[in-house]
Image: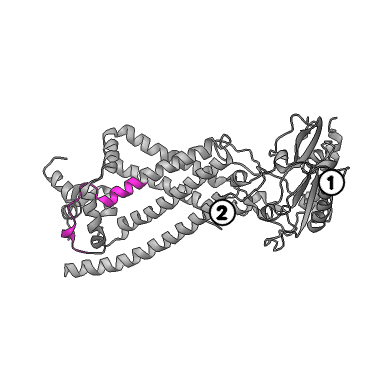
Amino acid sequence: MAEARVVERFRKRTIWFHWIHTAAFLVLLVTGAILFLPGLGGPAAGGLTRFIHRIAVVFFVGMPIVYFIINPRMSLHFIKETLTWGRNDVQWFSQAPDYYFGGDEEKMPPQGHINTGQKMWQFIVLGTGALFLISGFFMWFLKDALAAGVFQWFVIVHDVAFVVALLMLLVHVYLGVIHPRMTESLRSMWDGKISKTYARNHYGKWYDEVAKGKN
Amino acid sequence: MEISRKNFLKGAAGATGLLLLQPPAMAMAKDSQTSAGMAMLIDVTKCVNCWWCYAACKEYNELPETTKPDLTQPPALSSNVWTTLHPVMNSGKWTSRKKACNHCTDAACVEVCPTGALSYNEMGFVQYDKEKCSGCGYCVEFCPFGVPQMETNTITGVAIMDKCTFCPDRVTNGEPPACAAACTTGAITYGQRADLIAEAKERVATLQQKNTDASLYGVNELGGLHVMYVLDNSPAVYGLPADPEVPPTSIIRDVLRWVGSGLAIAAVAGFGLNYLVARLRTRRGEE
């Protein structure tokens, strides 16, 4: 029988936030991709997808703001965590190729609440999010005020953010849903819980703190 | 002078009839010869600033009526103004360049249009299908001449591009575009592009005997424009960029598409390989 999943990894509000944000991003991704990838522009005719893109943006930007207001301490912690990099991360990077290709789990140094790879993803989300928002803001509201050459560069910034975000999203989905080692990842983003063994193996440092009741 | 309402209505009635005859959709490869197709030649030395090209364009294309513009305040191109004049004060005398879409052979707007709304017509002009326009505005921002125009609803983003169409219903029936038909002084000539180039070269050569500033514009720019200009001064004076190009940013976008798609495919292939290896090795570890 499978081990009971008793360790709380994510709170309900975080899970709601994750999935609503995901939905908004996927809508943005699809309605944006049809204008970026050649030959897919057909459905954009008439401008409905542009309108949908704008509605999705309201959720994409609004959700983090709402989450921040409800949960300022966690939000600041998230940002700080994303921006803090150190020697542990170097160790993670040196072990990651072997680890993700199924090597010995013991060789990977114990990780905190998120590991370096997840931190990298958070960094990409914040970074590309900022690029999307800044370039998108100018393209939406200040189009007429911009010189044509400047507008073109904002389009390119939007494109670059799209390429980076899409590639990293593929990695995120693969690791979270498919990778043979991440057996409890997707479910933990559904009901917030993981088993003790999974916690110990994947987030050893964090689990020790949880077990001690520090967190 | 006011453009009379009667005139507008008369023209509009005729135009409506013609508009029902949609030109056949002509999917089309670029001319291998830059001089192919039909074109217009604008000669500023023959223009008398009468604005009839402007009026005829509005009338034929059923754009909202307006009074005759003043040369000191020429209307800018807009959704309702597909052609206008670019007037220049030359030693106490106005000369004007008719300004509209130049119908490039290598058109930036066609390159960047994501929906295929903009395309090349085999007669040489750049056509567009309003039904396919998404309102993204890339053509507006990438055209080196600033020709395509749109009014965008700021909240919804809904917009449809407009520009000079080259009067496809007329030219496919062997008639000149409305502006060329309306011009009484020969400042706008319509015909085979090769013939017009020969004609233009002669005119410029004659002008240059008295005026060394005279120039010819549009023969080679952007693979050859389908609207060319005989000018009594440098192109810059008449608001024409000396060396127009498809903006390099559009090439960067192409590179991003290729690099992005390539990396995405490589990533998915990598996941497959990773999955197989990781599964094999973790299983072995369990045994």
Can see residue A19?
Answer: no
Residue B165, horizontal then vertical, whole percent: 73, 48
Q: Going by the picture, which residue comes out furthest to the right?
A: B184
Viewer-nearest residue: B71 or B267: B71
Assign the C terminus of chain B to one quadrant of the image.
Answer: bottom left
Amino acid tagged 1: Gln
Q: What stretch is highlighted in magenta?
A: A103-124
Depicted B6 relative to depicted B267: above or below = above
Q: Mark 1 lies on which chain?
A: B
Marks 2 and 1 sit apart, C-alpha to C-alpha, by 52 Å
Residue marked by disc 1: B209
SS of the residue under disc 1: helix
Amino acid tagged 2: Gly
- Tell me what residue is drawn at x 38 percent, y 44 percent: A127
Q: In this view, does A66 lie to the left or right of B90?
A: left
- Tell me what residue is drawn at x 11 percent, y 43 percent: A212
Assign the N terminus of chain B to one quadrant of the image.
Answer: top right
User: Quick one: label 1, few (<14), some, or many (20+) residues within 10 Å?
Assistant: few
Residue marked by disc 2: A41
Tell me where residue A210 sits by quadrant: top left
- Tell me what residue is drawn at x 41 percent, y 41 percent: A130
